[in-house]
Image (cartoon, rainbow, N blue to C red):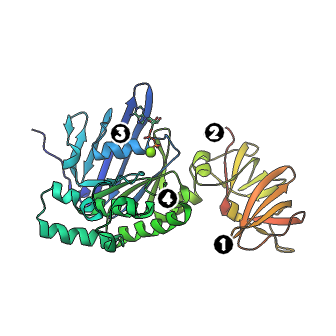
Amino acid sequence: MVRPEVTPSEDLLALRADDLHKKFGAVTALAGVSFSIRTGEFVTLLGPSGCGKSTILRILAGIETPTRGAVAIGGKVVNDTERRILVPPERRDLSMVFQSYAVWPHMSVAANVAFPLRYRKVPRRQRRDRVTEALRAVRMESYVDRYPHQLSGGQQQRVAVARSIVGHPALLLLDEPLSNLDARLREDMRVELKRLHLELGLTMLYVTHDQSEALAMSDRILVMDHGLVLQEGTPEEVYRAPASLTVARFLGVKNIVAGRVAGDGTVEALGGSLRATLAEPMAPGAAAAVAIRPDGFALAADGAPGPAISGEIRLAQFLGGAYEHEIDTGGTTVIAQSPQRLGGRGDTVALSIDPEAVIAFPADDPAP
Ligand SMILES: Nc1ncnc2c1ncn2[C@@H]1O[C@H](COP(=O)(O)OP(=O)(O)O)[C@@H](O)[C@H]1O
Ligand SMILES: [Mg+2]
């Protein structure tokens, strides 16, 4: 008999996924994904539709089997294709929230939330207390007797979240739980989920294709594409130091312009010379694809030293928290965001660009 492995160094690991592969016929959904999650951590899988995010969650939950790979939850191996270990979903200490709310229409809110406890034969009294506690956590305690059709989409999703936490799972998986909600509600729920994570000390693996959600909520983000993890890091790390053009694009860097490495930490681009970070060593003269974060632009102070570029404002929009400008810099249009208005349509402006916001990649980096 194979005994589950627990090694002391893994005490704090809520999850470990090792070399997960998944093929659906000719389609490779996962091409070797490994990661771990520490207890209490909020980790996000961020990537475009079809990159394999849901497949990972389904494998972790045990409702899909990997073609190859291993999964351990709380130090206990629940799946290992080589050792032929496969623990069924109901014996894995986790729960999952789906994009579709998946609450049972014929059951009251209380019955929906109590369901996992009934299944586990938790005594009635204890069940009632746990249901109240879970509903209170999602601020739905006054809706216990309602039915799903009497609730808004956001409220139904709260019920689904309450049901997922009522059994105190060691790991909570959330698959794009906010994408069916309208923009305003999505922001409220984002804060609510983060609050739950912090207040209940939940370990969460969150899936989204929305970079702002990932940046706002996560302790750590795994950026995925085509069944692989491209980069892993804190929100600040992946945002400020994307490892590839694909990651930069996916994190919302709208400006990717052609340039040339000039040596000494500068690149020629946008008709000027910009101080930049080179993503990897590149020889002077090498063609570069230069990613410039929209928030890196500012008006160049009169007489200030250092390089500046010149451009004509084509469009200035007030976004509430910031202004967004479309600026033509001699044929290349860039998007510049700043807390202040840089000028109005038709104005010619001199701009400085924060060197930290400029990253040069080899020009032949494969496009996504
Ligand atoms: N049951 C299935 N049968 C065939 N192909 C599937 C199945 N599930 C997922 N896929 C394919 O696997 C890839 C990854 O899908 P998925 O994990 O759902 O991506 P994501 O959740 O990131 O949008 C896609 O190409 C998808 O079409
Ligand atoms: Mg999906």
Q: Secondary structure at mark 3?
A: strand
Which three-letter amino acid code belongs to the residue tagged 2? Ala
Of marks 1 and 4, the one in the foreground:
4
> In whole angstroms, how far apart are the C-alphas of marks 4 and 3?
31 Å
- Judged left or right of residue 10, residue 149 is right
Q: Residue at horizontal 41%, vertical 51%?
A: 100
Specify which label sits upstream in the sequence, 4 or 2.
4
Which three-letter amino acid code belongs to the residue tagged 1? Gly
Please give the residue where the numbered disc 2 appears in the rendered image: 367
| Near-viewer residue (155 or 195) | 155
Residue 266, image x and y in percent?
74, 55
Please give the residue where the numbered disc 4 appears in the rendered image: 181
Which three-letter amino acid code belongs to the residue tagged 4? Leu
Looking at the image, how many numbered discs can be counted on the residues? 4
Circle 1/circle 4 CB separation < 8 Å? no
> In whole angstroms, how far apart are the C-alphas of marks 4 and 2?
31 Å
Specify which label sits upstream in the sequence, 1 or 2.
1
| Near-viewer residue (201 or 299) | 201
Which three-letter amino acid code belongs to the residue tagged 3? Leu
Specify which label sits upstream in the sequence, 1 or 4.
4
Quadrant position of ligand 2: top left
